[in-house]
Amino acid sequence: MKYRRLGKTNLNVSEIGFGGEWLERHPAEDGIALIRHAGEQGINIIDCWMADPKSRDIIGQAIAPRRDEWYVQGHIGSTWQNGQYVRTRDMQFVKPAFEDLLGRIGGGYIDLGMIHYVDSLEDWNTCMNTEYIDYVKALHEQGLIRHIGLSTHNPRIAKMAAETDFVEMILFSINPAFDMKPASESLDTLFGEYEQGLSGIDPERAALYRLCEERDVGITVMKGFFGGALFDPKRSPFGAAFTPCQCIHYALTRPGVCSILCGYDTAEQVDEALSYETATDEEKDYASVIASAPLHASRGQCTYCGHCSPCPMEIDIAMVNKFYDLAVSQPEVPESVRAHYKSLGHTASECIGCRGCEERCPFEVPVAERMEKTAALFGM
């Protein structure tokens, strides 16, 4: 298992995580065994947005023997009212729901206290201008939550969160299909109809990933499989099927992303996700699927897929492109980006213009031209 630093939290999280959404539909003992199996394979981050007591108990009991080795994303504002889940900012429900979460998860703390599911500007304003946010910050000051995060499906809300001085990480929905859709305040639109001729990553979403990378706000990923629709060419908006490994690799190659939280029903599904860690480049290759898909028409946009390798000058072309995109998105090159670029073993100035990388690029990116621009921008 590989681990990544979750932004400014400084937590080292497994790049393959555990989304707990499906736990409620299984017997408790099966859910406990499933989580423990995942932990034995090196998974150490789990999301608990669920408000129902059963799911919370399963997680708490499963991780109890190794509580200090697990990082729990626990959501503030996810409540259980009259036997059903209700998202709310009403403190008469928010406080007891969090106290219930704290008690059932165990250990006396929640690692990542998540401002739960903010998709609209109205809800953002409610969260940020009422006693709700005071409560979240108080929990942090008391050590009951060790870090503050936020979950959203809307890149505009995620951007505002990343620009605060207290949100340290974001749980965001990322997959190849969602990335083609513009921002929306309704999750339903992301799962809705897709127009033919999808043409690349939405600029706001691409800008969000760059912002999070620049500001050291770590991203964990939800809905990485598009509800399983990406595995079926008849349901896929691309008219072509992806594998779980390809979806995982897509998410993990976005700037700022640290972990993808997959949903599991069985130990075999855990093992299938974990096979990513030993997969070949061919097995990870999402770019060829996108580029050859009948309902996709993206050209000229670098997705950092790595098809351009190997470079005869040993330049990590995908990383150079990533730092170039990060740099040009700002009025001035951020010092953090400049430092990361300089730390590369080989920089764009070493490009000899052979264009072998361009022949391999499935999106027809003018790599040699971008290397020239990058060398001029960074001076090396």
Image (cartoon, grey):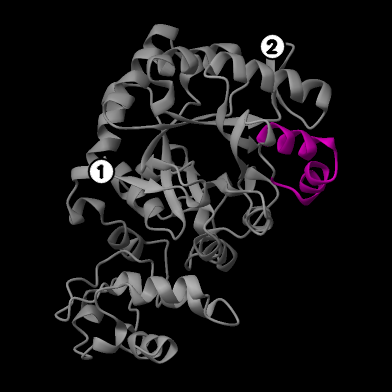
Q: Does the magenta stretch include residue 348?
A: no
Q: Is residue 125 left or right of residue 55?
A: right
Residue at 84%, 36% in the rendered image: 131
The relative height of residue 61 versus residue 313 in the rendered view (above or below) is above
Residue that numbered label 2 is attached to: 83
Residue 236 in view in this figure: no
Q: Do we see residue 143 in this rendering?
A: yes
**In this view, which residue lies farthest toward the front?**
142
- Spot occupied by residue 73 in the image (x, y as percentages of width and height): 54, 33
Dominant secondary structure, magenta: helix
Circle on res. 193: none
Q: Distance between the residues labelled 2 and 1?
A: 38 Å
Identify which residue is drawn at 70% across, 20% down: 97
Q: Name the residue under label 1.
A: 276
* Residue 149: image location, x then y, percent: 60, 42
Q: In which quarter of the image is residue 45?
A: top left
Amino acid type, label 1: Tyr
Q: In which quarter of the image is the N terminus?
A: top left
Residue 59 placement (x, y as % from top left): 47, 18
Question: What amino acid is found at the position of numbered circle 2 in the picture?
Answer: Gly
Name the residue at the right extreme. 130
> Residue 261, how many percent across, how many down?
43, 37
* Pick the front one: 92 or 136: 136
